[in-house]
Amino acid sequence: MTVLLQTEPAPEAPRETSAGRAFDGVICFGGGDWWYHNRGHYDLQMMRELGGRVPVLYVNSIGIRVPSLSEGGMFFHRVKRKLKSLARGFVRVSERFGVLSPAVLPGRYGARLSQAVAPVQIRAAARRMGIRRPLVWVTCPPGYRYLDALDPVGVVYERTDRWESFPEANTGEILELHRALQQRADLTLYCATLLFDEEKGSCRNAAYVDHGVDFDLFASAGRAGGGEPEDLSGLPRPRVGFVGAIDALTFDPRLFEEVARRLPDFHFVCIGSSTLPEERFALPNVSMLGQRPYESVASYMAACDVLVMPWNESEWITACNPVKLKEYLAVGRPVVTRPFHELCRYEGFVQVARDAEAFAGAIRQAAANPPEPERLRARVEGDTWKAKGEAVLNELSRVGVEPARS
């Protein structure tokens, strides 16, 4: 299977020759915290691939919103987690991969102070990684503020989500940073066709390189059969599984609860961190098992009979392309989901349902007549992260930015 790749012609030639724009490392302003978030995300997977060529410094998310007391207990949880991350400072996870939690402060005035302090920390950590001529990769738009201080030889803007639709974000400010990045970046990467088609004309250079999948990991788990995680072994079947963050941004708890009520003979299993009140899911056929390491989630998917994505209906979801879709397919289990635009590329491979009645019916049908697992796997077999990493390197070469030769 070939890697789906679309590009927009560059409106102008690179400012320097390819030889003059070789990067000896990557500084990535990530979309999450390395220590707490799922390491299967686009930015981290791409850093893993680029780390095979040059050193990588991953800068934990500098955030796009200020925590609010209105979040209740979650406010204190977020603050505690952030402080623990900051206390780690710089950690060299491996020879070619380092993680930095810079001292950044929330709010308008905090941003000004952070712009003076954080670059000093980032440059020092980059030097320790041997990075002198960085490619700066920006996932979270506020990373734009640090570009000038880091003097990059190239800039990549990863536009994987509508950050301006994030709850409690300063929409105007995020949009301003987003537009500035489109003009500054040597390459703006899209993994959802809706955003690519809407915005490619506003970028200096745009490319569509969608999510990859750790195909061997997920396919092997699905094919293995037999053993399953201990905390699932006592749960009845058929099982319906969801793996991912359970929060108001993406997850529709009302839909999920109503579907679970309509299917009392099915057991629902959720794997992932939750920011929603636990009492929302106090149903006898629902088990909330919490977050699990990325390396083990494939075994949880494989231990389910149907895998679901009970999304809410929002601008964020409309423009999304969740990496778990390919993981679900690689495992080889039937998939039922709420609609979103990117599903136009998966017609015939997933079941789509909007309301609870249709969703419950689709789950029952999928469990009774599951599709051929190898057919599902074949749809994503060529979409490995290695293939996607090579596609990104080709796009960078097109715009005159390349990794230095060792």
Image (cartoon, rainbow, N blue to C red):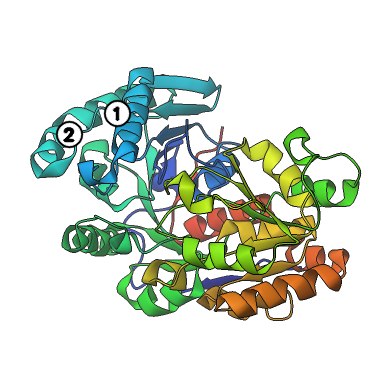
Q: Residue 371, position in %: x, y?
A: 84, 72
Q: Name the foreground residue: 339 vs 295.
A: 339
**In this rendering, would 212 be left or right of 147?**
right
- Rendered position, 170 above or below 108: below
> According to the image, label 2 marks what residue?
114
> According to the image, label 1 marks what residue?
102
Q: Is residue 350 visible?
A: no
Q: Residue 177, position in %: x, y?
A: 22, 57
Which residue reaches farthest left? 109
Q: Residues within 10 Å of mark 1 (few under 14, many from 20)?
A: many
Q: Residue at x 44, y 53 (%)?
A: 247
Q: Residue at x 34, y 18 (%)?
A: 87
Which image quadrant is residue 317 in? bottom left
- Lower position in the chain sequence, tag 2 or tag 1: 1
- The quadrant the N terminus occupies is bottom right
- Rendered position, 399 above or below 289: below
Q: Name the foreground residue: 106 vs 49.
A: 106
Which image quadrant is residue 117 in? top left
Q: Residue at x 53, y 48 (%)?
A: 41
What amino acid type should be assigned to the residue bearing mark 1?
A: Pro
Q: Secondary structure at mark 2?
A: helix
**In this rendering, would 232 be left or right of 247?**
right
Rounded to the nearest whole Å, what is the CA distance between mark 2 and mark 1?
Answer: 9 Å
Q: Residues within 10 Å of mark 2 (few under 14, many from 20)?
A: many
Callouts 2 and 1 close, C-beta under 8 Å:
yes
Q: Secondary structure at mark 1?
A: loop
Which image quadrant is residue 296 in? top right
- The quadrant the C terminus occupies is top right
What amino acid type should be assigned to the residue bearing mark 2?
A: Ser
Q: Residue 361, position in %: x, y?
A: 70, 77
